[in-house]
Image: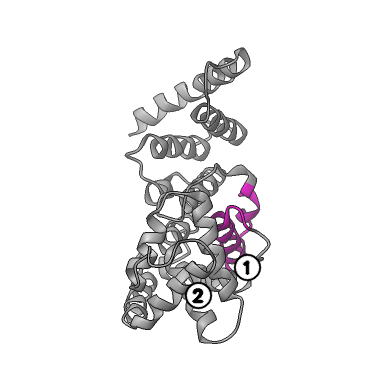
Amino acid sequence: MGATKRVFAGLDAEWALVCAVPASGVLVRGWIEEAGVAAAGMLPSGLRELVDALSARRDAAFSDRWLSALLERAAGEGEEAQLAARVVVQAMVPGMVRLTQSLLTLRRDFDDVAQVVVGCLYVVARTFPLHRRAKVAANLVLETLHHATRELGADEAREVRLEDLPDVPAVAENDVADHVAQALLVERGQAQQVADAVDVESAEGELVALLAWGVDHGSLPLQQARSVVGVVREEAGRVGAASAAARKRRSRAVSWLRPVAAEWARAA
């Protein structure tokens, strides 16, 4: 299976041509300003710099506003609608690489899956339900996942739900799509793909890899893996001392993970 990533390389080459038209950046910046997302003159006028600046800001409410402004334009007709959809697609490209990795199997080539994923993202960007004003990036990822899994003939999309995801700040790489990919991989127990979809050098990535390995090798029941993820999220969001019930859940999670970690270390 060759993960050549030609599809995404082609997208980047196309994006360079789109950004070479000065009027495109001015037009998109005008939409953002008109929507009240930013004051006039506060954002770059070059399209590449504009999208980079929007994507880099780690603010969930801000992300929702500027994505919604573009999705409203993308729902229309003509060249401007196509441009708005293209900007949304480009902003989501890092996440789509991760999502593509999470959908690979021994029978699926990277570029074949990527073509489906990107095509589905275009459709989602043009038909996005505009009443959804919160967690817009997460909804874009999940809707793309649901469309793509149907086209690929898979059924795992039903296992990943918006309410199961933690709050994530923006559309940058390692955020929304990473959480979706991690949830999907843990559900499917595909340890070999975790390393391609998450940063295993991070504590979170190592935990996901451990959970997926445990599920994959029958050392950790899927329900226990889900429970561990829930405990980790609870602990990450805790303010103040843990209750007796929370300490009990934490202790139980550690007891489940200890033998799995020992097996994982022996197999390494």
Amino acid carrying mark 2 in the image: Ala
Res 172 seen here: yes
Looking at the picture, how far across and down is residue 136, in whole percent?
A: 57, 57
Q: Earlier in the sequence, mark 1 or mark 2?
A: 2
Q: Which residue shows up at 34% across the image and 70% down it?
A: 48
Q: Which residue is mark 1?
A: 128
Q: Which residues are magenta?
A: 133-162
Model colouring: one colour
Q: Nearer the viewer, mark 1 or mark 2?
A: 2
Is the residue 32 above or below the residue 170 in the image? Answer: below
Query: Is 206 situated left or right of 158 in this image?
Result: left
Quadrant that contains the N terminus: bottom left
Quadrant that contains the C terminus: top left
Q: Nearer the viewer, residue 145 or 170?
A: 170
Is 156 covered by the magenta stretch?
Answer: yes
Q: Secondary structure at mark 1?
A: loop
Q: Residues within 10 Å of mark 2 (few under 14, many from 20)?
A: many
